[in-house]
Amino acid sequence: MTGLKKDVTGLKADVTGLKTDVAGLKTDVAGLKTDVAGLKTDVAGLKTDVAGLKTDMTGLKTDVTGLKNDVTGLKSDMAGMKNEFSDAKREVRRQVTKRLDQIQVYQLEYREDIRDAYKRIEKLETKVGLEPDHS
């Protein structure tokens, strides 16, 4: 019987050790459950963040599309302005050339008129007996 007593004592010790292990495992499981609950909260927060980022991304994509459209419109406006500027520049050059041509015509006409006037003045001075002034 002594062998049986030893077996029972050994089994009791094993049971006590197993109870201690189970108690430790229960504590570990409780800690893991707390960690899992914390992780679930973190994941829920991250999902909310991701949803917010997706919303932001959609808004940014819309903004980018709008800005691209603005750039396209501005490029078109700029091309139109360049054409208008070129047209205006050509018109100004044409007007300046025209005015310069008119000035040259007037200069030639007035030179001739002035020469004629000087000749008449000289004739009048001669008629009235004055000495012509050739200055």
Image (tube, rainbow, N blue to C red):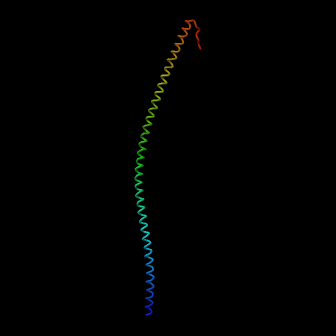
Q: Is residue 88 above or below residue 57?
A: above
How many numbered marks, from 0 up? 0
Q: At which x and y percent is residue 66?
A: 41, 47
Q: At which x and y percent is residue 33?
A: 42, 71
Specify the farthest residue to the bottom: 1
* Left or right side of 83 for 128: right
| 40, 66: nearer the viewer | 40
Q: At which x and y percent is residue 36?
A: 42, 68
| 97, 50: nearer the viewer | 50
Instruction: Residue at 42% x, 68% y: name it.
Output: 37
* Left or right side of 131 for 15: left
Instruction: Residue at 44% x, 86% y: name it.
Output: 12
| 31, 134: nearer the viewer | 31
* Left or right side of 78 for 127: right
| 17, 99: nearer the viewer | 17
Q: Determine the image quadrant of residue 18.
A: bottom left
Question: What is the quadrant of the N terminus in the image?
Answer: bottom left
Instruction: Residue at 40% x, 52% y: name it.
Output: 59
Q: Is residue 34 above or below residue 102?
A: below
Instruction: Residue at 42% x, 65% y: name it.
Output: 41
Q: At which x and y percent is residue 45?
A: 42, 62
Q: Determine the image quadrant of residue 22.
A: bottom left
Question: What is the quadrant of the C terminus in the image?
Answer: top right
* Left or right side of 47 for 112: right
